[in-house]
Amino acid sequence: MVKSLSGALLRASQRLAVNLLAVFVLIALPFSTVFATEKVVAIEGRTMGTTYHIKWVANSDEAADQAVTFKSDADQLLRDINQAMSTYISDSELSLFNQSASGTKAQVSTALYDILSKAQQISRDSNGAYDITVGPLINLWGFGPDKRITKAPSAEKIAAIRSRVGYQHLALLGDNTIVKHANLYLDLSSIAKGYAVDQLANLLGSAGYSAYLVEVGGELLTKGLKPNQQPWRIAIESPTAGRTIQRIVRVDDVAVATSGDYRNYFEDKGIRYSHIIDTKTGRPITHNLASVTVLADNCALADALATAFLAMGVEKSYQYASDNGIDAFFISKSNDGFIEKMTPGFASRIEN
């Protein structure tokens, strides 16, 4: 995010294929034979090292002008988010804070403070399975903005870096003020795309639109219905080398994020190292959970939880999802292929 914003514990590299058909719906006007038409307006672009797609339902007569105006607003919003949160922009707010010494106190923008607050809450709720301070370990294993590696780092190097990792070392004091109590390197790649989706959706809502789909790098949020009064649907990828569909899911009025470990990795001496880091060990995960899709009220939460769940493994994640009313879909590897597990709420959205 933010050129993918580096890949903190996670990052999740694969993403959803969005299928959207633009159709017309007829609106009968009382005592009249006149019909008004609506259409799906679409814009797209690049941000955070990936792409974005936005589609909304609008009056067909106004669609062209709306698209031009909204794209300009959306691009500016995304530039502002990048400037606040990117680890690939050397003078972004986040990069400057990362470059500062331990003990630094800084007053940051409302946007950066907001996303840090969300991230810290999820870290507490997940008992550290989600942790935006894991950046140094991500970089050590070659999955950050630094050079890729082809050989696993030594136990000594891992232990040295772990002393710099821990969400407890970051303090949020209020009034947009943050303090680092260690030589922290914060990485928001596991939540920034979801946050951007939420902000773009707010932009659409403020403009008066009530039916839309917003997607950034595979993370998305929908509201309302398409012009044919059908819900928005997406395809969830199978965690394979090719791009095959595992499931078609109805995603009306919900945020969706997927995280997987099957594309961003390297191999050394026959061992496969995932980009998802276990914060307890400082090493890539070793369990067999290959992909997680999470549904939530907002996309920042869905994005972060997808990463946390992939780090936690299927059993702990399923229990967390059940205890906290989160709908999720898990795909695990086995000797006989893939095994699916899903919450009842997610199962109700599967299209046969």
Image: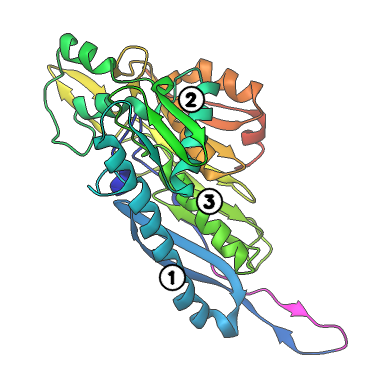
Q: Give the residue at x 39% y 49%.
A: 217
What residue would you read off at disc 1? 71
Q: Identity of the amino acid at label 2?
A: Ser
210 in relation to 140, above or below: below
Give the camera-side residue of 313 and 288: 313
Element carrying mark 1: helix
| Amino acid of disc 3 | Asp
Quickly name the residue at label 3: 198
Determine the image quadrant of residue 158: top left
The secondary element bearing badge 2 is classed as: helix
> Residue at coordinates 49% horizontally, 81% vertically from top-left?
64
The secondary structure making up most of the magenta span is: loop
| Relative depth, front residue between 148 and 247 | 148
Q: Which residue is mark 2?
A: 123
Earlier-in-chain disc, 3 versus 2: 2
Taking the image as shown, residue 10 lies to the left or right of residue 306, namely: left
Q: What kind of residue is marked 1? A: Lys
Residue 40 in percent (x, y) is at: 55, 70
| Residue 234 position within the rendered picture, expressed as x and y whole percent measured from the top left | 51, 50
Among the two numbered marks 2 and 1 on one chain, the one whose residue lies closer to the N terminus: 1
Taking 156 as reference, is 234 left or right?
A: right
Image quadrant in which the C terminus is located = top right
Provide the residue span drawn in magenta.
22-31
The crowding category of the residue bearing disc 3, from other C-alpha atoms within 10 Å (few below 14, some 14 to 19, many at least 20), is: many
Residue 83 visible in image = yes
